Image (tube, rainbow, N blue to C red):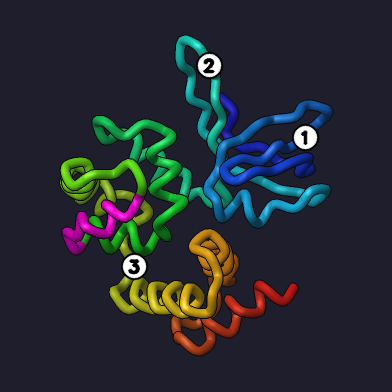
Amino acid sequence: MIASVRGTVEASGADYVVIVAHGVGYLIHTTSAAATSATEGSEMHLHTVLIVREDAMTLFGFPTLHERDLFNLLTSVSGIGPRLGLAILSHLSIDRLRQAVFNKQPELLTRVPGIGKKSAEKIVFELRDKLRGAATAAPAGDVIEVDADVMEALLTFGYTQSEAQAAIAAIPADTAYDFEERIRVALAYFMR
């Protein structure tokens, strides 16, 4: 199994990157935030999941282990394949996904293209106990809310959903969970 890939970004698209490592180019499907943040010629490290089907071997990659673990949990839900799991992680932040599951809010999941009411309810039902026992257990409610507020503010400022997600994902872990501080750091992401 290919657990991770580190190398130079050769190309990127809306939902993929091509990373060259030791002379081999790996096409890795990833979230829109990760693909948007990839710049040609820069180094990138992704934690990967290799999906083997009869007709293809496909790599899916994530900047953090938490995202990779959530992807594996999402694809363990009946009817949620890797493309749909990736779409969920592209459209919802990790905190927003946790909020949907722990607060029993399937309507948050129905905002993702391809997820209907029944699929959203199934995800909430099946992941509730799995997430509770996983290392990705939900943080305190204020942590979820502050990043949701930052997301809304960035969208109001005219940034796209994927740009806002990339900025929030780039906020250092040691940043205080204070709205003003987190929005300042998120806006600084666009200035670099």
Which badge, 2 or 3, is on the more N-terminal residue?
Answer: 2
Q: Is residue 76 visible?
A: yes
The x, y position of residue 125, in whole percent, is 16, 46
Judged by depth in the image, the label closer to the viewer, 1 or 2, is 2
Which of the pair 165/24 is nearer the observer?
165
Residue in view at x 62 percent, y 49 percent: 35
Q: Which mark is residue 56?
A: 2
**In terms of secondary structure, what is the magenta stretch mainly?**
loop
Q: Secondary structure at mark 2?
A: loop
Question: What distance separates the C-alpha of mark 2 from that of mark 3?
Answer: 37 Å
Q: Which mark is residue 20?
A: 1
Does the magenta-highlighted stretch encompass residue 8? no
Q: Secondary structure at mark 3?
A: loop
Q: Which mark is residue 172?
A: none
> Which quadrant of the structure image shows residue 111?
bottom left
Q: Amino acid at mark 3?
A: Pro
Which badge, 1 or 2, is on the more N-terminal residue?
Answer: 1
Q: Amino acid at mark 2?
A: Ala
Residue in view at x 27 percent, y 52 percent: 110
Residue in view at x 57 percent, y 33 percent: 3
Does the magenta-highlighted stretch encompass residue 109? yes
Total marks shown come to: 3
Q: Which residue is mark 3?
A: 139
Which badge, 3 or 1, is on the more N-terminal residue?
Answer: 1
The x, y position of residue 113, in whole percent, is 36, 46
Crowding at mark 2 (Cα within 10 Å: few <14, some 14-19, many 20+): few
Q: Is residue 129 visible?
A: no
Q: Quadrant of the N terminus?
A: top right
> Which quadrant of the structure image shows residue 46?
top right
Judged by depth in the image, the label closer to the viewer, 2 or 3, is 2
